[in-house]
Structures are given as structure tokens and as C-alpha cells.
Amino acid sequence: MVTFGGRNPLAMSSVTPPEGRLQGLNFTPHHYKPFSSHEHYQQVMCALHKLQQSGFYWGAISGREANSLLRSQTPGTFLVRDSSDHHYFFTLSVQTIKGTRNLRIHSEGGGFFLQADPPNTQELPKFDCVLKLIEHYMGKGEDTERTSEGASGGNSEEAKTKARIVYLIDSSGEKIPLELLRPLMTSLSSLQHMCRRTLNNQRPGALEQTEALPHTIRDFLQEYDSPI
């Protein structure tokens, strides 16, 4: 999938895992994309590690396979997969009222972001993790929460709209808003992971209250800090 500096020592997909499978799927590298720096490599690898724990990262499946998986799902159901385009690392596939749409996730300039619509002059937000990008468009991001909490004396819905940019998908000339409601899981999550996700939903400050826990449990909780 990627290499560092045009060579192989820091590759994600050039080396097949020992078990030869990822997330229960055959691990088939799509392409090789160079990292721009060692920091970029670390950021992408950290994002990949969290995606692998999320349960909705489907690895190297094609757009056609993603469409087949999402076709029978309700609008708002989504998954993340490896991009088939060698210019990108990941793709967000989502079921909409107009069918499945595939959105490339850019990784440059220090963060992850969705591809901007050419007529749109507004700069799209960047995130240091793919999961944070998804949280933002689900309305679960910290930026959305902070704004809505600070608007208790005003119009909270208006505040949420300002905090969370509405991303419009171009569907045959028609603009439809991106709606992320439910991830399509590769398998049933473990009880431990579901408990961790529940704790992450108890924002703000849920993890700060775990200092009294044993190190192994605290490290497990901090390893995955997303509510989705």
C-alpha cells in the first residue's frame, strides 16, 4: 500500500502479516504510496492501528465489494477500506439515499481530510486521525461537543452547524449531504472493546478518571480513544 521515501523499509502493505489475513479478509496490497516524511509515516501507522481496532476497517476490498456490502444497508451506514487509487491511503464508503458513494480520504499537510468540492471555497477541517475525521462528520467530535455545550443560552442547533461543516456529495449533478450514522462492522466486537467504546462516549474527561485502575486496563482504554 505504501512505502517510505520510495523504498520498502517502512511499508504498510509491502509486507504481508504472518497470518496472511487482516480483519478476517485476505490481505491483498493494492499499491505502494510513498510517505512524505517520517512524521507522516507515524501518523498514518497510528491511524491504521486504531482503524484495525475499530471493527469497521475492511482492508483491501474494492469499491465494487464495498458497494455489495453496503447495498442492503440503510442510508448512513459506512465502512473504511484501503483506497484503490495509489494517490490515497484510505477511502470512506457510505450508503446514501442515492446508493453507495466512495469518498477518498486525503493524507497531506499534517492531517486527514475529505476531498473538497471544486466550487466550495471553504477549507475543510483536517484531523490527525481517520477516526477523528469520522467522529466529526457523525457529530461526535470534540469540536462539535464544545460548541454545542457553550451554546446553552443560544441556538444549539445553529452552533452545531457552525462547528460541523456539512459535506456535500456530488451525485450525478445533485448535491446530497454526507450522513454517517452507523459503521458496518466486520465482526462482532469483543465485550472489552464495547465497554471501552462506551467509556469513550462519556465525554468529557472519562479517561482522566481511570488513574486508579491497573496499568494494563488503563493502557487498554487509552489505546483506543474513539467513541465509535
Image (cartoon, rainbow, N blue to C red):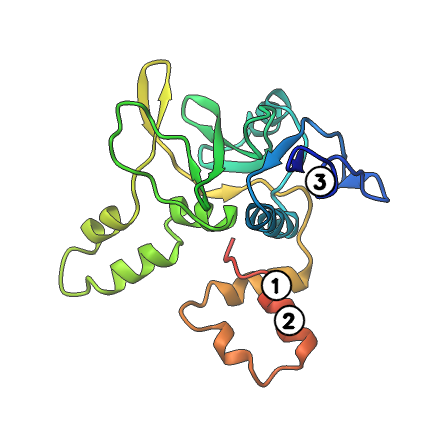
Residue ID for mark 1: 223
Residue displayed at 52% across by 57% down: 226
Disc 1 and disc 2 in contact, CB within 8 angstroms: yes
Q: What's the amino acid at mark 3?
A: Ala
Residue ID for mark 3: 11
Spatial distance from mark 2 to mark 3, Cα to Cα?
A: 26 Å
Disc 2 on helix, strand or loop? helix
Residue displayed at 70% across by 75% down: 216
Residue ID for mark 2: 219
| Of marks 3 and 1, the one in the foreground | 3
**Percent position of residue 205, x then y:** 43, 73
**Percent position of residue 11, x then y:** 71, 40
| Of marks 2 and 3, the one in the foreground | 3
Residue 171 lies, with reference to residue 2, above or below; the image says above
Q: Residues within 10 Å of mark 2 (few under 14, many from 20)?
A: few
Residue 81 lies, with reference to residue 54, above or below; the image says above
Q: What's the amino acid at mark 1?
A: Glu
Disc 1 on helix, strand or loop? helix
Is 189 or 47 nearer to us in this picture?
Answer: 47
Disc 3 on helix, strand or loop? loop
Is 105 or 22 nearer to us in this picture?
Answer: 105
Spatial distance from mark 1 to mark 2, Cα to Cα?
A: 6 Å
Answer with mark 3 or mark 1, whichever residue precedes in sequence.
3
**Percent position of residue 139, x then y:** 37, 50
Q: Residues within 10 Å of mark 3 (few under 14, many from 20)?
A: many
Q: Looking at the rendering, which quadrant does residue 28 occupy? A: top right
Disc 3 and disc 1 in contact, CB within 8 angstroms: no
